[in-house]
Image: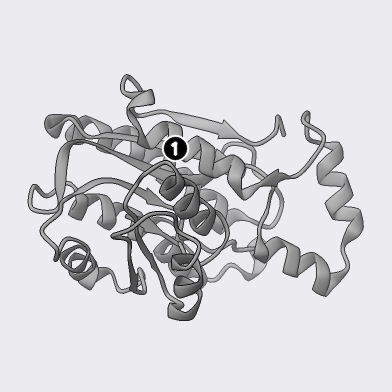
């Protein structure tokens, strides 16, 4: 199961894992974009489910649909999330609540549902996409930074209970990734200076690609990382 599969890192991860032989259940809010992702998947027996993860009380229905063919899940990559920039002076409680709903609360509920024996197999693996800003904060992102920091902490805590079913859970600290969203922002606002400055601050000397994160997901979701859990993998280009 891959959330946020309609674009960006979620879409790239869906395609990447399908090329490695995985059967994908791709979910996102935009059905048209999900269909575009579906058209690029390699192999058969994939599925798309249009769903809004902010509907926390009905996430169980997402899982029921995901396994309606009788096949339980072997893994989950949570890539859905919304970048949120708001200076502290404008960060009203309502906005903070919305930020946590999009970038943290749904993750915990997804893992809670995945943990149920009717939805997943033992020795499964879960990956949560976080951000390097959760450990290296930047100005104007108090909401986003703290929501992702909460996600990091939850991974360490949930790993203890998930281990009872031999389910591993890890996170990825994604850095500056050139996705459809960031490209659109640069095009609309013409902020070439910011884009160039971020490259200068990277030890790798470039922006990351969505496939950089997808490859890390492939490692953590597979048996290649069978002795790894409760960990955060930095995919930030040395930022």
Q: Residue furthest front?
A: 43
Which quadrant holds residue 24? Answer: bottom left
Q: Is residue 210 left or right of residue 168?
A: right
Q: Is residue 156 left or right of residue 8?
A: left
Question: Which element type, helix, strand or loop, lies under badge 1?
Answer: helix
Residue 36 percent location from the top left of the image? 51, 72
Foreground of the two, 33 or 162: 33
Disc 1 residue crowd, few under 14, some 14–19, many 20+, Cα 10 Å: many
Q: Quadrant of the N terminus?
A: bottom left
The residue labelled by disc 1 is 218
Residue 145 percent location from the top left of the image? 56, 50
Residue occupying image coordinates x 24% and y 68% = 62
In this rendering, is residue 145 above or below 225? below
Residue 201 percent location from the top left of the image? 82, 36
Q: Is residue 167 visible?
A: yes
Residue occupying image coordinates x 37% and y 44% = 21
Which quadrant holds residue 29? Answer: bottom left
Residue 82 percent location from the top left of the image? 54, 64
Residue occupying image coordinates x 64% and y 70% = 90
Q: Is residue 173 left or right of residue 188?
A: left
Count of numbered badges drawn on the protein: 1
Which colouring convention does the figure follow?
A: one colour
């Amino acid at each position: 199961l891959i959330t946020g599969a309609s674009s960006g890192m979620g879409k790239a991860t869906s395609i990447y894992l399908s090329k490695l032989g995985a059967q994908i259940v791709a979910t996102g809010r935009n059905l048209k974009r999900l269909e575009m992702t579906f058209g690029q998947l390699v192999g058969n027996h994939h599925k798309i489910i249009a769903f809004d993860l902010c509907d926390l009380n009905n996430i169980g229905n997402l899982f029921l649909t995901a396994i309606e063919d009788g096949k339980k899940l072997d893994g989950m990559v949570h890539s859905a999330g919304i970048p949120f920039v708001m200076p502290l002076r404008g960060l009203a409680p309502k906005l903070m609540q919305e930020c946590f709903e999009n970038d943290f609360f749904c993750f915990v509920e997804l893992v809670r549902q995945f943990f149920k024996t009717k939805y997943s197999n033992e020795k499964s693996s879960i990956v949560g996409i976080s951000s390097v800003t959760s450990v290296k904060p930047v100005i104007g992102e108090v909401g986003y930074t703290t929501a992702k920091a909460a996600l990091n902490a939850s991974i360490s805590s949930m790993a203890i209970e998930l281990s009872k079913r031999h389910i591993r859970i890890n996170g990825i600290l994604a850095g500056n990734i050139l996705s459809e969203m960031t490209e659109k922002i640069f095009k609309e606002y013409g902020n070439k200076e910011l884009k160039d400055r971020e490259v200068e601050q990277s030890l790798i000397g470039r922006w990351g690609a969505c496939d950089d994160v997808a490859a890390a997901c492939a490692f953590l979701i597979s048996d290649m990382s069978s002795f790894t859990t409760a960990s955060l993998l930095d995919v930030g280009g040395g930022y």
